[in-house]
Image (tube, rainbow, N blue to C red):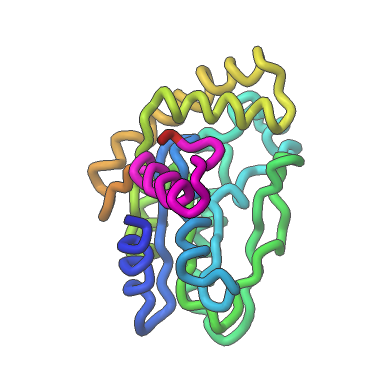
Amino acid sequence: MLEELARRAAALAEDRRAILGIAGCPGAGKSTLAEKLIAQLDPAGAWVVRLPMDGFHLADAALERLGLRARKGAIETFDAYGYLAMLRRVQTELDHTVYAPDFHRTLEQPLAGSIAIDPRVRLVITEGNYLLCPTEPWPLVREQLAETWYVELDDHIRRDRLFARHVRFGKTDLEARRWANDVDEANARLIAPGRIAADLRVDMSEIETCDAAELKAQTGRPGEGFEV
């Protein structure tokens, strides 16, 4: 299945620079799919680049000023128009390197100028929660995308992974559970209706099952963290 997805992604950029969007609820596997596609298509980093929407998080100082610190990750806590402007630059500025921000998970802050998109790049994979949302400016964002895929995962697995992620990056068990239930799931309810507008829906459990089966065939043991 991953090979088929990689071929479809590569075909978008056969004769032009293209941007592939990957949307989905928090914890569904957007970043994982983007990383797997890059590993499949371009492990040397020659012509495919990942550009996460998370780089356009408002910094904590801005969130504090706006009274939104407790809702970090909600749709209003992103610089959506800045993200749109960056996608437009990626599409039109082809003769020089465009530098974009990334998101540092440990710091939980955006880092400016972390991603270099140089003229040889043909496929940019951007992933984020709100790519298929109907409110402005997200329809304008989608206009910049050659295709938008929606990633799906069983809700119980997705929530468990969100909880584990929050703990891994410094929250207590209680804080992680509250954030996953109160913040992430509120965002998920906003995101989920967008699945019907996607060009393709991707079941991440199928990809993980295939990965685990392949690893077991190669090594005789299942991969850590996979459902087999």
Above or below — where is 203 with respect to 116?
above
The one nearer the camera, 43 or 144, is 43
Q: How many marks?
A: 0
**Region in magenta:** 204-226
The stretch drawn in magenta includes residue 215: yes
Residue 76: image x %, image y %? 53, 37
For the N terminus, the image quarter is bottom left
Measuring 48% from the left and 57% from the top, which residue is drawn there?
36
Q: Relative to the observer, which residue lies in front, 159 or 115? A: 159
Q: Residue at left 62%, top 73%?
A: 98
The relative height of residue 209 versus residue 96 in the rendered view (above or below) is: above
In the image, 195: left or right of 65?
left
Q: Is residue 157 visible?
A: yes
**Residue ranking furthest to the top:** 174
Residue in front for this viewpoint, 64 or 3: 3
Q: Is residue 154 above or below residue 221?
A: above
Q: Residue at x 36, y 84 (%)?
A: 15
Image quadrant occupied by the C terminus? top left
Magenta region includes residue 130? no
Residue 134 at least partly seen: no
Would you place residue 126 above or below residue 135 in this image?
below
Report which quarter residue 174 is drawn in: top right
Farthest bottom residue? Answer: 95
User: What residue appears at the point 42 percent right and 30 percent down from the top-left corner?
Assistant: 188
Query: In the rendering, at what x and y percent does residue 146 appear?
Result: 34, 66
Q: Position of residue 55 (x, y in %)?
A: 62, 51
Q: Quadrant of residue 144?
A: bottom left
- Going by the picture, which residue comes out furthest to the left? 196
Q: Main secondary structure of the magenta part?
A: helix
